[in-house]
Image (spheres, rainbow, N blue to C red):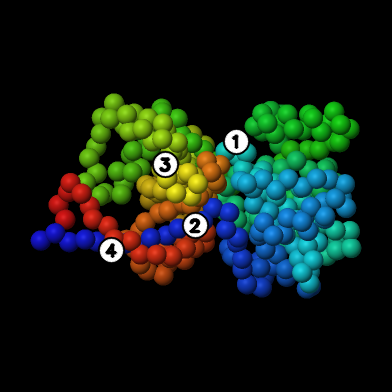
Amino acid sequence: MLLTKLNVYLRIKIGSPTSALVSEIYEFNTMYVVSSIEMREATDADLPQIQKLYANWGHTFAFLLNDQTFIAESNGRIIGAIRLAFEEATFVLRSLFVHEEFRAQGVAMALLKFVDIELGLAEAYCLTLPEKEGLFARVGFQLVRGLVAPDFITSRKESLREGNQEVTIMKRTFGLEIRPLSARDLRTAMDLIYEIELPENIKFDENDIRSIYSKIISAGGVVFGAYRGSRMVGTCTLNVCANLSWSGRPYGIVENIVVTKSERDKGIAKSLLLFARRMAENKNCCKIFLMTEHRDLETASFYKSAGFFDERITYQRKLGAEQ
């Protein structure tokens, strides 16, 4: 007899705000309190206030589509902000500013810790004034010397130097790098996928692997790898699908979130999901999906911590295989 399988369907709308409860800094989706000051992710409606804040600083605030902005708010007034950009597949902290009336109250640190939780294990860079190095060091940033940083970061530093503004490059890393993998790493990624031990996991030859990879890339998708040094310890695939609705904006589907057994429960899967989400934003996806057959609270909590929520139920029927 043929049966259909009922799956939980998780979705995150690109650009939807992150909100949280008021408490101390310990986990994702948590508010921070510094006196009567509240931290949250900004929405489009906050843009006029944020622009006014930065105008007082003498800067123009760029509210870009693929950025996340986190704000500090007191009695409905925005008094601090920081931007988490995703540029050339790299996270960059930009434009940390606190209104002068609220400085020396821990607001800047609370903003940084809010971003720290959002990043998980993901690497990130920042350009900061030398006197602010200690502040960023408290959330894991270290000085970058030489030509270690991406070219666009070093070029930005040189541009600021030419404008008589001296800054230093700092990097936040926990020994894990997530990046789109190259064709030469495909076999290693497949070895990780085979660890899932699904009955329909046919082992492909090299030509088949490269052919499937080419189809994913040509459609706008990305295959990621999580690396410790030269060793790949996790992988994830973002498929990008063309769409006739949502003004023609595509949607993303996340598949094959795999972390090798010895590296599980260390936050790597969450970092892969975060990377997939930001890459989907860069590709102008209207939303991003994943499906799971697991209904336990632990699994639901994990996906929610990565910004995915159980909004609907889908009905699935596998094709071309025994049911």
Amino acid carrying mark 1 in the image? Glu
Amino acid carrying mark 4 in the image? Leu
Residue at 62%, 39% in the rendered image: 87
Camera-side mark, 1 or 4: 4
Q: State the separation of the CA atoms marked 3 and 2.
A: 17 Å
Amino acid carrying mark 2 in the image? Ile
Task: Mark 1 and mark 2 in contact? Answer it, CB < 8 Å.
Answer: no
Query: As rendered, which of 279 and 141 lies closer to the eye?
Result: 279
Q: Which residue is mark 1?
A: 88
Q: Earlier in the sequence, mark 3 or mark 2?
A: 2
Q: Is residue 239 left or right of residue 275?
A: left
Q: Which mark is residue 12?
A: 2
Instruction: Check disc 3 and report its element: helix, strand or loop.
Output: loop
Residue 316 x %, y %: 27, 57
Count of numbered badges drawn on the protein: 4
Q: Within the image, what quadrant is residue 116 found in?
A: bottom right
Where 87 sits versus 301, above or below?
above
Amino acid carrying mark 3 in the image? Ala
Q: Which mark is residue 6?
A: 4
